[in-house]
Image (cartoon, rainbow, N blue to C red):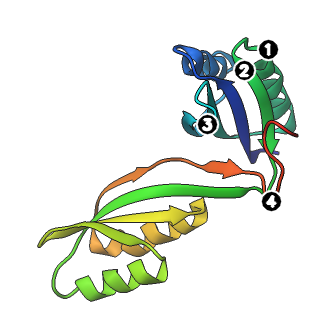
């Protein structure tokens, strides 16, 4: 049975490391659902957060192969209790008749209008992926012009960190 899982990878912040990590997935025939990468609390390291679908064998194989890469310092699967967030920018059409309805949805979803013109608005939404999907479904009738999503970033709850697991 296929499950969705999140892998946190702590790597050297060097040229070519991301290419090696993503190349591992393509060589093995695994699809990445989302990938985010950024510098960590220590500038010499980056953290890559990868979400993918697969069975337990695929998950174990990916983790094993990632740990073999020279610039990889730590690999962990984040469990369900991890804090997960995503950022989405969505541009929707509006008119004087729909503006209030869209603004009500923005308030309910604790989103933020970041750009506004007479015929469209750009909205920033953060939260878990299900929240993003629900907001997209709510905006469909108004006319979505464009969507950009970052992919998931995640941290373990409490005092646990990737490096002290």
Residue found 19% across the figure and 88% down from its top = 97
Q: Is tag 2's residue or tag 3's residue first in the polypeptide sequence?
A: 3
Q: Secondary structure at mark 1?
A: helix
Residues marked 1 and 2 touching at CB (< 8 Å): yes
Which residue position holds label 3? 40
Residue found 73% across the figure and 14% down from its top = 69
Q: Residues within 10 Å of mark 3 (few under 14, many from 20)?
A: some
Of the 4 image quadrants, the one containing the N terminus is top right
Which residue position holds label 2? 72
Q: What whole-number distance in Å separates the C-alpha atoms at marks 1 and 4?
A: 27 Å
Q: Is tag 4's residue or tag 2's residue first in the polypeptide sequence?
A: 2
Q: x and y percent of residue 14 in the render?
A: 56, 17
Residues marked 4 and 2 touching at CB (< 8 Å): no
Residue found 43% across the figure and 72% down from its top = 111
Q: Is residue 73 above or below residue 33?
A: above
Q: Is tag 4's residue or tag 3's residue first in the polypeptide sequence?
A: 3
Residue found 21% across the figure and 75% down from its top = 94
Which residue position holds label 1? 68
> Can you tell which quarter of the image residue 115 is in?
bottom left
Residue depth check, mark 2 versus mark 3: number of the one nearer the observer: 3
Residues marked 1 and 4 touching at CB (< 8 Å): no
Q: Secondary structure at mark 2?
A: strand
Q: What whole-number distance in Å separates the C-alpha atoms at marks 2 and 3?
A: 14 Å
Q: What whole-number distance in Å separates the C-alpha atoms at marks 1 and 2?
A: 8 Å
Which residue position holds label 4? 81
């Amino acid at each position: 049975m296929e499950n969705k899982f999140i892998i946190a990878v702590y790597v050297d912040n060097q040229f070519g490391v991301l290419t090696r990590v993503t190349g591992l997935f393509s060589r093995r025939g695994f699809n990445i659902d989302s990938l985010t990468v950024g510098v960590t609390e220590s500038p010499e390291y980056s953290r890559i957060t990868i979400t993918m679908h697969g069975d337990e064998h695929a998950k174990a194989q990916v983790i094993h192969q990632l740990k073999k890469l020279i610039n990889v310092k730590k690999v962990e699967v984040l469990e369900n209790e991890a804090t997960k967030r995503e950022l989405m920018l969505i541009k929707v059409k509006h008119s004087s008749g729909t503006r209030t309805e869209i603004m009500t949805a923005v308030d309910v979803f604790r989103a933020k209008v970041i750009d506004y013109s007479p015929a469209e608005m750009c909205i920033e939404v953060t939260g878990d992926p299900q929240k993003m999907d629900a907001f997209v479904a709510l905006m469909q009738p108004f006319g979505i012009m464009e969507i950009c999503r970052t992919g998931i970033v995640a941290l373990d709850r409490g005092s646990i960190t990737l490096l002290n697991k």
